[in-house]
Image (spheres, helix red, strand yellow):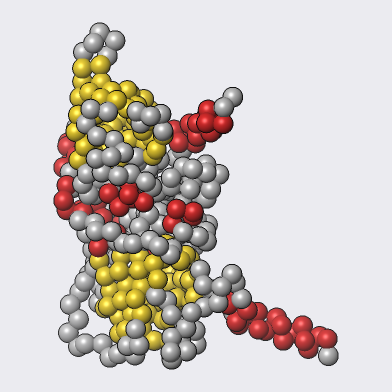
Amino acid sequence: MPWRAIRVSLLIPVLMGSSAPLSAHHSFGAEYDVSKPITLTGVVTKVEWTNPHTHFYLDVADAAGKVTNWKFEGYNLAVLYRIGWKKDTTFKPGDRITVSGWQARDGGAWGHSRQITLPDGKKMFFGPPAGTGDGGAAPAVEVP
Amino acid sequence: MRALVIAAVIAVAASGIVSAQGPGSVPRTAEGKPDLTGVWQGGSTQRGTWEEANRGVGVGGSGVDPSAPTVLSSNDRPEGREAAPYQPWAAKKVVEAYNRRGIDDPTGLCLPAGIPRIVMLGLFPQQFVQTRDQIVMLYEYMNVFRVIPFNAKRPDDIIPSYMGNSVAQWEGDTLVIDVIGFNDKTWLAGTGTFHTDALHITERYTRVDRDQINYEVTIEDPNVLTRPWTLRSTLMLREGTRLQEMVCAENNIDPDRYEKLLNEGVKFTRD
């Protein structure tokens, strides 16, 4: 098995199954459903490089060829910059990519992005693990 | 005699002096005080550049090394540390806020994270600029700052604020910052950890070697806590990292999303 395949296979359970008590700008659990992991491939139609979160839109075709435009949330600009993303360079409208993440609680075409596979096959994180912003395993206090 | 030498070594170790013998010595000012100037990452114990120290799969990590440790979050008190000693009525309110965290978290509204939450989080760097008369603390998260004079008298007319009114003094090699004058709109350390405007915070920054500041914070608020609450964390030097602009209000669509989901009956509480 090539080294790259080994690395990816190691990463998948960690990144998809994580419920680590980590944090971003807001609660993951309030908006996204950890029981709804999704992996979609499509064409990027728009990227919003904005704070407090970036978003990108992806045209995804189903088996019958019907195209749905999905919206995904990611890290803020500074964090993406520090892990290697470059605006209009790393990915841009027209690129065909695969995204892994979790669907919104309302079940719409909206998701929390975790990992993106770029057109050249390179994989990069675009958003934090599941469970972010949820305060950890328990509230900071125990009610007497 | 040998016992005396051993006792002396133990005494020196206990005083913290030997902790300066880390990978690099503590930089000092012309006045001989530790110089805390630099860019720092909270919630981490890893030495190295930002890239080297954030290779894990946790929040903000590049994922290059799945076994690398994660950093502390802004929503959690440090792992394994003392729980918040809230009065019973206040503890219930903390849990209520926890269950409405998507709505009640001040940072969800792009408001400053407050102290000590903003100091201990790991996702965003903070920069200290120390001069003879003051230390300036700059935080990338929400782009807030503190300008803290040394040995200064407080003004008589403090305006309640998110980051409070700070004054600093040295106790040996430890920088002690006393903070009052808070409003009641931030969380302390952990989801829902509210406080009142009676909040009094004492921070102690001790640069133990070139790469590390030990951070200890004591939180007092007799209106909601039963006793002072002390937390400890570390700040690690991140040479080469530059703070970025973060204009959170630019595109904060999340509060409207929360409200929509709430109206649709989505359960926000932890199952």
Farthest residue in the top direction?
A: A64
Q: Nearer the viewer, residue A107 or B134?
A: B134
Image x and y of residue A27, in percent:
31, 45
The answer to whether B33 appears left or right of A68 in the picture is right
| Residue lying furthest right | B1
Please state, as top left, top right, bottom left or bottom right, where the C terminus of chain B lies in the image. top left
Of residue B90 and residue B195, the one placed in the foreground of this image is: B195
Q: Give percent across and percent down for residue B106.
A: 24, 56
Q: Nearer the viewer, residue B257 or B209?
A: B209
Residue B143 in percent (x, y) is at 25, 62
In the displayed structure image, the side of residue B23 where residue A24 appears, left or right: left
Residue beneath the point at 30% across and 52% down: A78
Q: Residue at x 23, y 27 (%)?
A: A94
Q: Is residue A114 above or below residue B182?
A: above
Q: Is residue A1 above or below residue B247?
A: above
> Horizontal and vertical percent for residue A41?
32, 23
Residue at image point 53% right, 48% down: B68
Rendering quarter of residue A47: top left
Quadrant of the rendering where the N terminus of chain B is positioned: bottom right
Residue B195 quadrant = bottom left
Is residue B21 shown left or right of residue B184?
right
Tell me what residue is drawn at x 21 percent, y 54 percent. B248
Residue in the foreground of this view, choosing between B268 and B242: B242
